[in-house]
Image: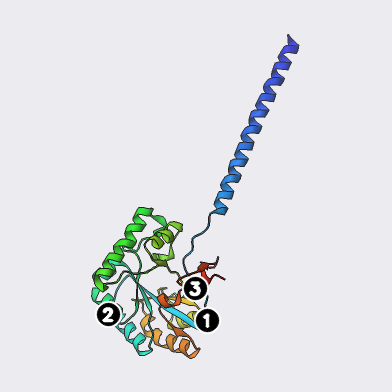
Amino acid sequence: MKLYVIKLNTIHKCILIGVFALILFIGIYASRETVVEVFEQKRDLPIYSVECEQKKASITFDCAWGADDIPDIINTLKEHNVRATFFFVGHWAEKYPDMVKLISDNGHDIGNHSYSHLRMGAIDSNRIRSEISKCDEVLKKITGKKPELFRAPYGDYNNSVVRIARELNEYTIQWDVDSLDWRPGITPEQIKDRVLKKVKNGSIILFHNDTPHTAKTLPSIIKEMQNKGFELVPVSELIIRENYEINVEGRQIKKK
């Protein structure tokens, strides 16, 4: 009887060990599959800059708050024969339709910056689509043109944001040169220094309107860039339209 109990216990132990081994194997395999799936998922990147042999770059402005400095910015661009790209928040455009029309009539790109200036990476796909589409409607009503460029507020995006913008026939545009003109305490000299040190062929430069220094600093920044041989063109003329890919740095390059 004693021998029987020992054998039964041994069998039970073997069964338990087998069950635990099976659970461990399943856990490891499942984890491996999850890890592989995550790493194999391709990151859908916006355009941060563009491969460009010529000395070309684009100046862009995000418009989300006031509008008092827009006429000065437009006059500066006109004086230096520069066309730029403006990204408008929808409710800003509704508040300042005359400024949107002024910018459009002067030949600058009209870009979508969402309707409500939300963090797009934190909302669901339906809201992402609604934010882009609603802003499109506002801008088309004012200018007669549907935007083909989109920039996510705060530069906050994920694969869904880029994909949905693409489904709406819009390129998602980031930047590789940030002026930080919005930052409290930054000086005009610091803004200028940041831009001139970082700009390169194919750069997309980020400015904002309604800041203490941007409109006043812009003339000298443009002059310095033009003195360095840069041609400043809108993003719509900088990007590659066909047969391209975007590398891990967000640089749009021509496929070979």
Camera-side residue of 196 and 25: 25
Instruction: Report helix, strand or loop for mark 2.
Output: helix
Q: Residue at x 47, y 69 (%)?
A: 47
Instruction: Report helix, strand or loop for mark 1.
Output: helix
Image quarter in which the N terminus is found: top right
Residue 232 place in picture, x, y as percent: 43, 83
**Which residue type carries mark 1?**
Lys
As drawn, the label of residue 18 is: none
Q: For mark 3, what is the residue? A: 49
Q: For mark 1, what is the residue? A: 197
How far apart marks 2 and 1 lie (CA) works out to: 31 Å
Q: Earlier in the sequence, mark 3 or mark 2?
A: 3
Q: Earlier in the sequence, mark 2 or mark 1?
A: 2
Q: Residue at x 47, y 70 (%)?
A: 242
Instruction: Say above or below: 183 vs 14.
Output: below
Q: Residue furthest top?
A: 1
How far apart marks 1 and 3 lie (CA) works out to: 16 Å
